[in-house]
Image (spheres, grey):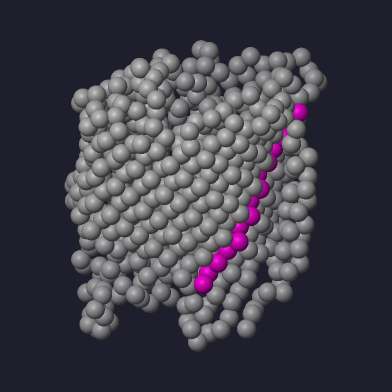
Amino acid sequence: MKTYHQKYISSFKIGFRIVLAALFLTPLFVSAQVEEMETDEEVMVIAPFNPSISKAQKLNFQPKADTNTTQKIKIDYLTTAQLFETNYSLEKLTAAKFIDRKNPKYAQNFAKAGYGLYNSIYGELFVNSEMSKTSQVGVHVRHYSTNGGLDEYAYNGSSLTTAKVWTKSVRRKQTTNLAIDYKRNQIHQYGFRLEDYPIQHDKTTNDFKDDINQVFSHIGFNMDILGNFDTKYRDWKIQLGYKYFWDIFKTSEHLIDIDAYYEHPVEWIDVDQQHIGIAFKAQTYSTKFNFSGLTPSIDSSESYFHGLYDIAPYYQIKQENLLLEVGAKLSMGLDSNSNVRVAPRIKLEVGLMGDQLLLYAHLNGGIYNYSVYGLSNENNFISPVVPLMYTEYKYQVKAGLKGHYLSFLDYHAFIETAAFENMPMYVTDISAPFHNTFTVIYDGGQQLGAGLEANFKTERWNVELMGKYQSFTMDTATRAWQKPSFTYKLKVGYYVLENLKVTALLLGQSKMYNLYQGEKTVEPWMDFSLMADYHLNKDLGFFLKVTNIFSDQYHVWYEYPVQSIGFMGGVHFAF
């Protein structure tokens, strides 16, 4: 029996017409010339370790004020452990990179494999065509699996497999990027102790392995088209994406994303450059919850259409080291109801001391559209059926500075504040059989934050430092549930020899709180890891990694501890 389906038909038609109009109009913008090929794909280039510092690269001075991006939580001992992400998005720095003085012929293919404690298996492969000014093709495949190794908890093994095929084509008027990607993430919702369920445990022989299994999968397609009239300073870009997401409980989603902008030069006042532009963003999502996946005796499903459409006209001027952009953003959220918000869009950026320092202030706002796909990426242990709502940002203000000193130091610092409605938070789902998954609740409030990021590089040293602070004042909730106030990261790499690099990583976060039978505390944690990477020659190398050296089984979510100390060793080969 289908329920709620007809309720969303009219909204789906509205969203479909908007998307169809966008797909028809955006190709009209395609009329441009590209002189150089970008190189931001997953191309792995391998060279002998003979490092030196290149000329300092100019920072990408495009800090964003958005705080509403869905973040991931991931403790990945396979490569580099990740912090429990907050809602803040610090910009990636473009520090000078190591290059070979002798400019060798780079390898385009790379394979890496390893094995470690807890029966951990790791493999990764990059295969790329030869570099060309007009076209390129690449493949990236990655796999990691482990049995978990937490004896007091339910079965905690996991398996992650990803694959991506991409291609780039450069023509006289445009550059086109195409990519197809696949991901299968099998986890077990092990967030309960075996001793708390002795009767059920006696009836199982595999620590509830089958009862708590979950698999998130998706397959997607992305296309980027970029054009640029360099002689007249006109610019445009179109990004199109489709993703199909599903899990073993028959929850599924169709996700269509469009992101485009167009800028045209004008001569209204006497400045170096001035443009008028328009940015367009569309998210056309359809989510289906199938309750028979949870309870076979119930034959019902619920389909939910939720679309978001942003249109943002703006006017931009550049005068020497000053950039000013003024505009507005109209956000329309369409589901069973219509939700419309108009927010200002203002950017002010001032460069000082040439390109060594930039001061900026941004004002923004609007609506954010959540999906099960996005929420499950942030928290792998959510329940199969969770409520979805729009988050509305009344305003977002961000101000900061970023720059570099000579060729070895990049830095970025900022402060930020926002007022929002319906921010998602994860709390224990007491309807789950073992209280081992999280549902989503929403609340409004205000947010205040600050961040610092620095990157220091010399011929032998590579030091990365990051710290983030945030505080919340909620409207009705007593806490911002499972959101830490402070996160930090310190990564230090040192070339002991030209072919031997040792890297130390320290990361951690402050305590946070979960709502479950009252207020529960998730204790603060600190994680320290070491890795050695040795190159026998320019093609063959070996690595060894020791993770969680403090052997602290801290919790990344409430009742979800990580593995104790771990070891992994392996080999990598360039060809």
The front one of 161 and 118 is: 161
Q: Residue sitting at 50 percent across and 24 percent down?
A: 59
Q: Eyeballing the image, is 437 above or below 292?
A: above
| 162 sits to left or right of 245 | left
The front one of 218 and 390 is: 218
Q: Is residue 506 visible?
A: no
Q: How many marks?
A: 0
Residue 429: image location, x then y, percent: 42, 70
Q: Is residue 568 visible?
A: yes
| 512 sits to left or right of 363 | left
Residue 411: image location, x then y, percent: 42, 26
- Quadrant in the picture for residue 461: top left
Q: Which stretch appears magenta?
A: 250-264
Residue 21: image location, x then y, percent: 78, 51
Magenta span main SS: strand
Q: Eyeballing the image, is 98 above or below 334?
A: above
Q: Residue sitting at 76 percent across and 63 percent down?
A: 13
The N terminus, quarter of image: bottom right
Residue placed farthest to the right in the image?
268
Q: Residue sitting at 63 percent across and 24 percent down?
A: 35
The front one of 288 and 551 is: 288
Residue placed farthest to the bottom in the image?
297
- Quadrant in the picture for residue 418: top right
Residue 572: image location, x then y, percent: 29, 40
The front one of 57 and 129 is: 129
